[in-house]
Amino acid sequence: MDIIQQSLSAKGFSDEAIRIINASWSTETDKQYNTVWKRWCGWCKERQIDMIHAPLNGVINLLADCLADEKSYATINMYPSALSSTLCSINGVAVGSHPLVTRLLKEVYNLRTLSPRYTSTWDVTKVEQIVNAAITKNNETSQLKKVNLDSSLSNIKGANSDLREIKKVKFEESHQFKKKVNEDQYRFNSKLMDNLEEVTSSCSTQNLDKVKESLEKGESLLAERQKHILLADKSDYGWMVIQEYKKNGLAEDSNNEKIVRVEANRFHRKPSQE
């Protein structure tokens, strides 16, 4: 803002008047005008021109240089306004209002608005082709990954199924239990473990319906086992009675105790085998 103070002081304004005028500038205006004044001062210094009492041709030449430097119309149009606040008037006319300055700005406006903003642009067709090719490639990659994932999940399910069958075969062919009750418990545990594996597998694939079905199946197995335990506990002959009970099929709960008593009476006439 020193150049404004120098200009106003040269025109006879007091220090207080200069302070008030300087305070009237907004921050944005001060920032924009400072850019103009810095270039104007440097331009005048290179040409040994009085920056406050510069001739009209000096201002015109500066504006022409700005046009040659590819400055926009908005930037060039700011120069006369900023310089008018500092330079002395020419023949009683402010620099920014001089006919030659306004004529030059009019032509600058015509040149800048008629010129294309960009010297080159993209070929929209080529851009669309590149984008479509990228989308197609991405879809193919996604489809391939889905096929691989489905294949992997299918292999895992098959392996789990084979493993369960192997467990059953090993048990049926090679293992002989000394007591029937132990064999029954082992078979029950195997069924329950298979059921839990089904739940785990269904969770990994987020198959909630299958998870619910497997949990209900496991709940049914446990409920049946609990019923057998309670019935066995009511008889002196325990699980031997339950074996006969299971052979005849499960009766209604209201007949359970009656059937247990019948089977117990029959076993009462046989030696204990448990």
Image (tube, grey):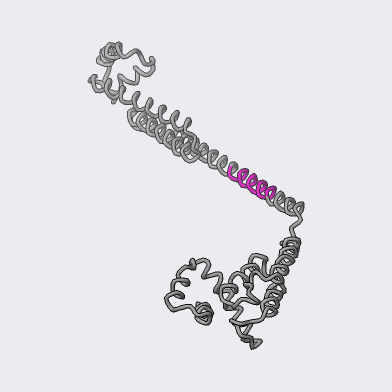
Q: Position of residue 104 (x, y in %)?
A: 72, 69
Residue in the foreground of this view, choosing between 223 and 46: 46
Q: Is residue 125 magenta?
A: no
* Residue 149 as seen in the image, left or right of residue 203: right
* Quarter of image, res 199: top left
- The residue shown at (59%, 41%) is 150
Residue at position x 28%, y 13% in the image: 266
Q: Quadrant of residue 111?
A: bottom right
Could you tell me residue 228's position as x and y percent?
Answer: 31, 22
As drawn, which residue projects farthest toward the front?
92
Q: Position of residue 128 (x, y in %)?
A: 73, 50
User: In the figure, is residue 244 to the left or right of 157?
Assistant: left
Q: 1 above or below 151? A: below
Instruction: Kindly tell me whether residue 44 is visible in this rendering.
Output: yes
Work out which quarter of the rendered image holds the C terminus and state it.
top left
Query: Does residue 269 appear in the picture of this structure?
Result: no
User: In the rendered structure, which segment of residues is drawn in magenta?
Assistant: 135-149
Front one among 87 and 201:
87
Residue 128 relative to residue 149: left or right: right
Q: Nearer the viewer, residue 110 or 159?
A: 110
Quarter residue 251 falls in? top left
Is 248 rendered above or below residue 168? Answer: above
Percent across and percent down for residue 273 are 29, 24
